[in-house]
Amino acid sequence: MENKTVAAETHGGGASSALNVFSSVRLAVFLIAALIFICAAGTLIPQMKERHFYQAYYGGGANIIYLFSLNDIYHSFIFYFVTALLAMNIGVCSMRRLKARLASLRSSGGFRDGRDISGLKNAAAAEDFDEGRFEALKVRLKAAGYALTTGGSPGGVSGFAESGRWFFAGEQLVHLSILVIIAGTMIGNISGYKTYFRVYPGERISIPSPRYQAVRNHLERLMAESRAAGADPHMAAAPLMKELETISAGGGRELFGLRVSDFKTEYFEDAAPEKSLAGKENEQSVKNWNTYFTVEDGGRDISSGVIAVNSPLYYKGVNIYQSSYYKTRDRIKSVKIRAERPSPVAGGAVAAESLEFKSIGTEASFADGKFRLKLVSFIPDFAIDPVSREIYSAGDSPGNAALKFSITSADKAETDSVWLLEISPEFAANALRDLKYGFNLAIGSIETFEREASGLQVNYDPGVGVVWLGCFLMTFGLFASFNYTHKRIWFVYDRSAKKISAGGAVSKGGLDFSKEFAGLFGPAGAGAKDGGKDRE
Amino acid sequence: MEEIAFSTAFFSYFICAFLYFYILFWQRREPGAFSAAFLWTGVLSQALALLIRSQKAGYAPMSNMFESLSVFSFLIVVFYLWIEFKYKIKSLGPFVISMAFTMIAIASVLPRDIKPLVPALQSYWLVLHVLVTFVGEAAFAISYAAALMYLITPAGEEKNDPWQRFHSGFVTVNAGLFLAVISYFITALLIKRSVISGDGLLAAVPIFIFFAGSLSFHFAKNMILLMMPPAETLEDISYRAIGFGLPVFTLGALVFGAIWAHRAWGSYWSWDPKETWALITWFIYAAYLHARYNVKLKGRAAAYINALGFISTLFTYFGVNYLLSGLHSYGKF
């Protein structure tokens, strides 16, 4: 960032004053402090939780959290604002500093007279300095990496030795790297996408093209906003739905396909079993999760392999990661239902029949064929969305298992349907009573298949290469700026008096330079003195 | 064998720290050779313990808190040896070796079972990311020690600073806290209690040691001053250690961490608490260097920013693991 000297050189009109503000170190330090505060707040306030979580946790403070978007602080206006200001600050002061450094480079060379030299912090004078010692000095300066320029002065030689002339390239690279990283992140945010798939062995997933996914993400955002505003989401989404259809019709929906032939959890063979997180049962340690895939593109199989943790698939700019795994019990193996009909005679026995269904779509009849039941759907963990009233499964394994049956009766033209809930049998009883069928249905047993599914994360981030470039520039720039110092030595050698006067300046690392300087010009460091200017 | 090597390192560092303090307080140079011998014994034993553990486990010993603390303390000592060799000063020793001993003392009471690595950690990036980060943080530790020493040995005009009592008090509290932390874990070790057992003795001993240690340090610091290196040297060490540590920390924690996260989690940055606090640490040291370069910030103000940077480093390492949850949860035990 800009230093006081450079800022002072450029004061002037309104635009210049604004630039001075933007390039000030104080602003930079303030913005860095603000970012530290924002980042720290983001680790202390739980992020991206539901609204009711903040209300339960913070009470009235939840309103403040929402007002300043503290629930999603890293995507909040204030975070973007501070980051943008810092980027501007870095950009402006880098340009101005570069200009000042280049100007300084042009004017810093050349010789100095004895009085100037003696005013430097590192200054020395040596007597009995004959031609032999002078030649030896030149050799030592060159060996130490100095570029040496000498010229004639009245009665002797003036010299200027310089090392690390481009020392400021490091700091410029660091500043540039921050801008490059921000640019890479923005490219990724604007043009990239991230989506997840749950894939069972034998299934094929369609990896969306960036264009299709961008429209889809836009659509989902729009629908969510419409819902939140109480509007009809489908109305607002209609143009985008049409656009998605157009992309699909043009064959632009899919980038490529991924066929998953198998998914396996691999365990350590020799390792001692360890306790589960619940600490109840022993289980083997997982070595990895492996998804066996084949890439299909343009109707052809392109490649096959395994996606595992730390071993993603990279194809057509898309990375596919082993993100999670699922053990599900959401597919019917066998369902037994009890159909109960009360006796027509008061106090008579209840007639009960057991019906079995092996899969969705299977049918069974009872009461001598008078009623026919068809298993329509199975929800492992029945739940209803309180807003949309849509039915969904809260989990992958039976919790509040629910079965939907359609009922056909010889006495009724229309078909009815009924939900049977495992933990609320009265739900079906009430519904059937209302339908006046004269029987009740109850769940006897539900058996499910256990299946493993692979959780794959699909990322398309065209900015990631730019981010890596920024990381490289930052690391290189930091190493360069600390290990590359600008050292300058001026001297005047009086041949007739056999006397040399020398002075030096360094951009940083003053102690080391003082030692080096003393080694070059002073007998065991004598001659170096305190005071004066030692920094540029 | 690993146990013997680890215990040898533990006791060597303890004796070495004791000898360093003895040299510092009583201005005696005779035990210097013994302290060096114990220091080298400690560092070599610890290297051996880490090598044996790597061989037994089949992976670099950086997968849990015990292993990472061992590596961190080892690197702090290695970095200190380099500083001692370069600057020919031993007076940083009491502070730095006490810090390394604190780490190894904490490690000694943590679970040290060798467990198979979780899938996310099965990568060569584990070594690159963690080891390089610790090299940077070891440099920060040295810088912090030099900054604390600087605060009690002001240079130039700072010698007449009316706030000198405050600065000395800050260092005294730091010293007291270190002694309290050491005593906490040694007590846990001696009474064979878990470090999180909530035992009354585990609370009483560190509190007593904190006050006793702070008072002792307060009265002894004038004796320490006699053996201190020049303030300019301390400033130089402090700055140079950050000058070395920040690029290395950037490479290890942020760059290698981002590359590994991109490879394992599919996102180079997730605003995970560990990532975020590493970034905060980076910001603090970046602010330090900016202020130093551009407004020529030196002396005490720089020393305080430096201390803040190391406190942030420690919070990133310990605080995030135990107080905040996130993707780096395997670093807890």
Image: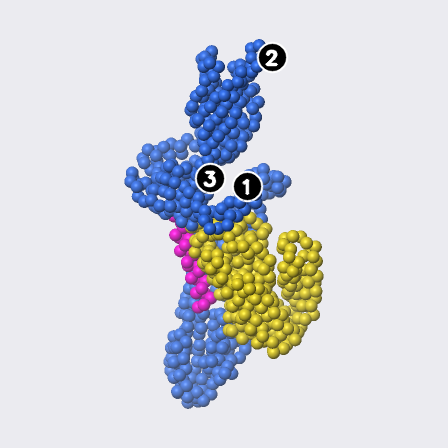
Chain colours: A blue, B yellow
Please report, as a chain letter, where disc 3 is located: A
Of residues A161 and A260, the one nearer the viewer is A260
Please report, as a chain letter, where disc 1 is located: A
Q: Amino acid at mark 2?
A: Gly
Q: Do badges 2 and 1 share one subunit? A: yes
| Disc 2 packing (10 Å; few <14; some 14–19; many ≥20) | few
Judged left or right of residue A464, residue B96 is right
Q: Nearer the viewer, mark 3 or mark 2?
A: 2
Q: Which mark is residue A326?
A: 3
Task: Say which residue appears at 40% left-offset and 34% top-offset.
Answer: A240
Judged left or right of residue A497, residue B19 is right
Of residues A425 and B304, the one nearer the viewer is A425
2 or 1: tag closer to the N-terminus: 1
Q: Position of residue A142 (x, y in %)?
A: 39, 77
Residue at numbered disc 2: A347
Residue at numbered disc 1: A49
